[in-house]
Image (tube, rainbow, N blue to C red):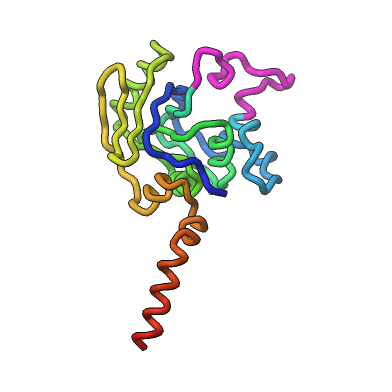
Amino acid sequence: MPKTKFNILETTCVPLPLENVDTDQIIPARFLSATSREGFGDNLFRDWRYLKTGEKNPEFVLNSPVYSGKVLVAGKNFGSGSSREHAVWAIYDYGFRAVVSSFFADIFKNNSLNNGLLPIVISEELLQKLQSQVKQDPSTKVRIDLEKQEFSVLPTGDTARFEINAYKKECLLKGLDDIDFLIAMKDQITDYENNKIMVK
């Protein structure tokens, strides 16, 4: 399923300053039976969002009316644990389009890029500064320029360049997953194969 094209995003943020958040905390294992990507957002951080009574936990950030936005500002080592792709599906389905941290687990980072979610690595110093800024002023906006690979905190003027695989960058810019990318390249692939046959 093609994802939304990602180029420039300006949005407020949701702060989650917890370190070592693993994929089971992002989406508990009991919710992995579905195979469709839709609907997982309902159970994002399920055991933190809801009390044992089934009521929303008023102290959890996703239930706060103060914070909103398409960027999740996470703590260090986000997405550790098992390799479940469902964790990314849940974050994307909830409405986030990027996650910012000072470090991501490699498998989670790759799963994110494969599913239209942009993982942005910034320095620990800037991450802490951003967390504090958002807590003090929830209306704080950040700007992500994927083409230039720049992440900016608009009120403070702090800007950082982030790294991304060139192929995955192109897929995000065009709103394509791996299969969509190959389909879009069908004519070029056919021409290449035909030319190869002619050379033989």
Q: In this orientation, which residue lies closer to the viewer: 179 or 135? A: 179
Question: Which quarter of the rendered picture does the C terminus lie within?
Answer: bottom left
Q: Residue furthest bottom?
A: 200
Quarter residue 63 falls in: top right
Check residue 49 for magenta coloring: yes
**Given the current orientation, which residue lies at the most extreme top position?**
136
Magenta region includes residue 95: no
Task: Tell me where the magenta segment starts and ends, as one range.
Answer: 46-68
**Residue nearest the observer in this picture, 179 or 126:** 179
* Above or below for 114 versus 124: below
Q: Position of residue 126 (x, y in %)?
A: 30, 26
Query: Percent position (x, y) of residue 64?
Result: 55, 15
Q: Does 151 sit left or right of 191 as displayed?
A: left
Magenta span: chief secondary structure: loop
Residue drawn at 28 percent across, 26 percent down: 125
Vertical arrangement, residue 178 with respect to residue 77, above or below: below
Q: Is residue 151 above or below residue 140?
A: below
Residue 182 point in image, percent of width and height: 47, 61
Residue drawn 66% across the image and 22% down it: 50
Residue drawn where x is 48% and y is 24% of the image? 69
Q: Position of residue 31 (x, y in %)?
A: 68, 39
Number of marks in the rendered image: 0
